[in-house]
Image (spheres, rainbow, N blue to C red):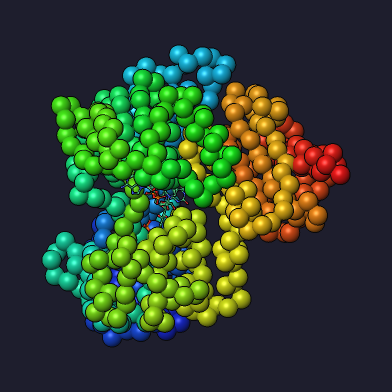
Amino acid sequence: MRKVNGITPTSANKQIFVVICHSHNFMRYYLPNRYDQVMISFPNLGPSAVQCAIESVKKGKKVAVIDKKAGVGGVCVHTGTIPSKTFRESVLHLSGYRHQGFYGKSYARDNITLKDILGRVNTVIANEMDVIQAQLKAARVDLIPGLARFENEHEVSVEGDSGQPTRLRGSKFLIACGTRPAHSPLVPVDGKVILDSDDILNYDTSKLPKSWIVVGAGVIGMEYASMLNVLPGINVTVVDGRSEILTFCDDEIVSSLKMEMRHNGARFLLGESIKSCEHFKNGVKVEFNSGKAMFAEALLYCVGRQANTGGLNLEAVGLSRNPRGLITVNEKYQTSHPHIYSAGDCIGAPSLASTSMEQGRLAACDMWSNKDQTTSQLESGNYPYGIYTIPEISMVGKTEQQLTKEGVNYAVGLAKFSELAKSQMGGDIKGTLKILFDPDTQKLLGVHAIGHGATEIIHIGQVAMAMDCTITYFRDAVFNYPTLAEGYRVAALNGLGRLTKEH
Ligand SMILES: Cc1cc2nc3c(=O)[nH]c(=O)nc-3n(C[C@H](O)[C@H](O)[C@H](O)COP(=O)(O)OP(=O)(O)OC[C@H]3O[C@@H](n4cnc5c(N)ncnc54)[C@H](O)[C@@H]3O)c2cc1C
Ligand SMILES: NC(=O)c1ccc[n+]([C@@H]2O[C@H](COP(=O)([O-])OP(=O)(O)OC[C@H]3O[C@@H](n4cnc5c(N)ncnc54)[C@H](O)[C@@H]3O)[C@@H](O)[C@H]2O)c1
């Protein structure tokens, strides 16, 4: 066997190497295409591809990953989860937001620039890439840079910088190509004044625009709007075509978010549709069909995402896409070709990094017939949502409005963060933990939280729901004190107390 770049292509338990590359410099050497049992998971190692690749390696498979950008991590690490959540940490730190209750509004650092915020973002991205790269290196997953497209049901071609496409053959495939920001001809995104959620991370200005219109009150829009809103001297207006924001969240929690954002200066223009949007002086002017018009120094456009499935030549291999470019899969993440799987954002909701990872793992378990590990709480819907607005929101299970719609009787237990010693000490006392439970069986139906730490403490509720606990578990449990987790005991006592009063 020939040695290439010091590496000998061996074949562990008959799983044949197709690609050998040095992940650092991407020097490549390809053996001829006479191979089987190769999973080519493409593209750019987003969370679903990483988990699928690592799970497949555990099964003794040789995995190649095609990656259109030089750098692992996908949207999650480069433009989505990791940078936006680090952006938030920077904003919280620089604005001193959580400590203003003790030290006053002037506690914020002077002249906060995007450079200050993005410095932290870029450091965390680099570290995350290093972690993933190390994991893949240890697992001997081969990274192949380039743009992938199907040539037939068992082969993909990869076009890299050299221009000469390479063909790879595999027995199993995972399509995990993710999404990109959706655009509209009405709103000319230019990356300078009119931005999408990718542009804000590459924004070439040291000065933060003082006024922002954020179009789209979905998760991305609300996260960025609430971050910008706590920076000193910045005005934010949130615009959405719908009459309500974050419609999948509990109404009471959403009302608290809006109240807190309004308190910090935000304005909401809901049920509005854009008639025109154009550059105007040093900013942007938006006219609405309702007759309103407004001006801002910058506009952030976040009205949803479009799947990156266009260039994959899926039609040629008989795979169809819906109008948003999404791929249809069955409960095992198989497309209409059983050996071609798909996972992550390109198959649609819930489109989270957390659920994408699990989909990738489950796809690998099914590919390699590891039936004993294919049980997952993903199917039962017992997974949380974490919305990193300021203040943050998290939820698991049903909302009040869902239960009402389904005709389910429920009771409520509440803990106000202002009642928790831990919140008092932290200085951020605005928050609520709300437990919805069945008043007859006392089984948990949903847990909703808003406030600092919500995305962490939600997991207690998640586990309790998975274990089919009743609310009395929280009444009887002894929690560390002082903690935010203690809110579960407070909410249980509150909920059970209300029941006693009612009976
Ligand atoms: C701003 C933002 C914030 C988010 N915050 C959160 C959060 O807080 N929590 C959470 O759970 N989720 C969050 N998400 C969602 C999360 O990032 C996604 O669910 C997750 O990244 C999807 O993973 P994936 O496996 O589908 O691949 P992705 O991470 O989408 O990566 C796919 C990769 O494939 C590459 N690619 C596409 N086409 C090709 C091709 N033809 N050839 C080669 N490569 C190709 C793309 O360049 C991309 O890098 C956020 C998303 C965004 C946009
Ligand atoms: N913390 C998290 O888990 C997190 C964070 C960010 C993103 N994400 C994922 O990313 C996905 C995409 O997020 P998103 O916010 O881009 O999409 P979204 O679909 O959640 O929200 C888009 C919003 O834009 C509005 N809208 C659409 N067209 C419009 C128009 N022409 N004018 C005005 N408003 C319009 C919609 O009514 C909706 O409220 C989400 O589904 C989510 O799963 C998750």
Q: Is residue 59 visible?
A: no
For the point 72% across and 53% down, the residue is 409
Q: How many marks?
A: 0
For the point 32% across and 77% down, the residue is 319
Q: Nearer the viewer, residue 43 or 166?
A: 43
Query: Ligand 1 appears in which quadrant?
Result: bottom left
Q: Nearer the viewer, residue 323 or 476?
A: 323
Q: Nearer the viewer, residue 441 or 361?
A: 441
**Relative height, residue 194 to residue 81 (above, below):** above
Q: Residue 365 appears at what percent x and percent y? A: 52, 74
**Relative height, residue 374 to residue 280 (above, below):** below
Q: Quadrant of the N terminus?
A: bottom left
Quarter of the rendering containing residue 310: bottom left
Q: Residue 58 appears at what percent x and percent y? A: 50, 71
Q: Residue 483 appears at what percent x and percent y? A: 69, 34
**Relative height, residue 281 to residue 177 (above, below):** above
Is 421 positioned to the left or the right of 330 in the image? Answer: right
Q: Is residue 446 visible?
A: yes
